[in-house]
Image: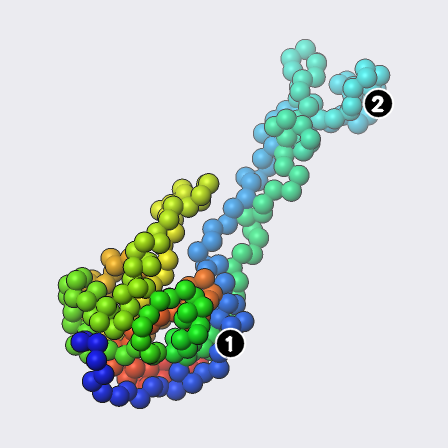
């Protein structure tokens, strides 16, 4: 809590997992695909809601032969005449040639054991300072970062920021605070219209007020050790997020054997 070494902690076996960037990225895409929504044209759009029809017989009424026009589906008008060309893709207000299909499979499946292995690999990557710096994190401390259990009882925002700054994470907090940028183009209408860099991830074993105190700090996420996901541990599919663990979180990983299939 004061930024000084108070004791030593035994790291659970999850931190000994092999680093698998391919598996982490696959699990990330599988998790993100659950947020996508099906899209597609209405069934019969441009085809079923018009009077246009193609008359193929040469001497049938409205067949359109010998008038110097292409024989395409045309709408019926009173008096036996023919109106606009419709239905075909090259016509105004015609159907789309290849519309998106609402029944397309967009969810990427992943095996349960494979997902857990990816989470364990992302957990182990939080100890690698090279991976953390490659993600753009700025810090003046050794990894992994472990806080005592009193950190879980912090209930004020300024106290959480003060503890993180004493750990040597001041530059990373400023990077996330100053890095919030508006999205360009149509993307500004989505996801709030802003892009927020990811900063510190705080993992606790028991929430005694820490989650409410840390939830509004720019770029900081706070999660229970039982609810870790690839998107929290490796935003964008890139492992090595700057993570602070509490002693209770490490104990839960060790005693309960979390994320082992």
Q: Position of residue 241 (x, y in %)?
A: 38, 69
| Residue that appears at 30% across and 56% down | 177
Q: Residues within 10 Å of mark 1 (few under 14, many from 20)?
A: some
Of helix, strand and loop, which one carries label 1?
loop
| Residue that appears at 37% across and 66% down | 137
Can residue 119 be seen here? The reply is no
| Residue that appears at 41% across and 64% down | 136
Q: In the picture shown, does residue 189 fall above or below 141?
A: above
Q: Position of residue 55 (x, y in %)?
A: 76, 25
223 and 11: which is toward the camera = 11
Residue 129 lies left or right of residue 145; in this view the side is right
Instruction: Please say if the residues under marks 2 and 1 sit with CB atoms less than 8 Å apart.
Output: no
| Residue that appears at 24% across and 69% down | 164
Gap in Å between the C-alphas at discs 2 and 1?
67 Å
Of helix, strand and loop, which one carries label 2?
loop
Q: In the picture shown, does residue 169 fall above or below 91?
A: below
Q: Which residue is mark 2?
A: 58
Colour pattern: rainbow
68 and 202: which is toward the camera = 202
Q: Which mark is residue 37?
A: none
Give the mark, 2 or 1, whose residue is nearer the N terminus: 1
Can residue 77 be seen here? The reply is yes
58 and 125: which is toward the camera = 125
Q: Which residue is mark 1?
A: 20
Residue 227 lies left or right of residue 28; in this view the side is left
| Rendered-image quadrant of the N terminus | bottom left
Q: Residues within 10 Å of mark 2 (few under 14, many from 20)?
A: few
| Rendered-image quadrant of the C terminus | bottom left
């Amino acid at each position: 809590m004061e930024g000084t070494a108070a004791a030593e902690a035994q790291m659970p076996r999850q931190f000994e997992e092999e680093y698998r960037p391919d598996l982490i990225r696959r699990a990330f895409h599988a998790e993100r695909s659950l947020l996508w929504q099906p899209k597609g044209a209405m069934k019969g759009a441009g085809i079923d809601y018009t009077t246009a029809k193609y008359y193929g017989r040469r001497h049938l009424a409205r067949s359109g032969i010998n008038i110097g026009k292409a024989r395409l589906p045309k709408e019926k008008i009173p008096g036996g005449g023919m109106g606009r060309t419709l239905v075909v893709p090259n016509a105004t207000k015609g159907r789309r040639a290849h519309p998106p299909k609402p029944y397309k499979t967009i969810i990427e499946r992943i095996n349960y054991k494979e997902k857990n292995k990816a989470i364990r690999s992302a957990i182990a990557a939080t100890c690698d300072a090279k991976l953390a710096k490659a993600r753009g994190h700025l810090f003046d401390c050794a990894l992994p970062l472990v806080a005592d259990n009193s950190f879980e009882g912090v209930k004020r925002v300024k106290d959480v920021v003060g503890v993180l700054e004493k750990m040597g994470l001041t530059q990373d907090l400023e990077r996330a605070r100053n890095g919030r940028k508006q999205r360009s183009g149509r993307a500004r209408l989505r996801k709030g219209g802003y892009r927020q860099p990811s900063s510190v991830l705080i993992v606790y074993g028991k929430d005694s007020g820490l989650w409410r105190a840390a939830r509004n700090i720019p770029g900081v996420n706070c999660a229970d050790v039982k609810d870790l996901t690839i998107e929290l541990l490796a935003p964008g599919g890139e492992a090595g997020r700057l993570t602070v663990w509490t002693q209770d979180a490490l104990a839960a990983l060790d005693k309960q054997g979390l994320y082992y299939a």
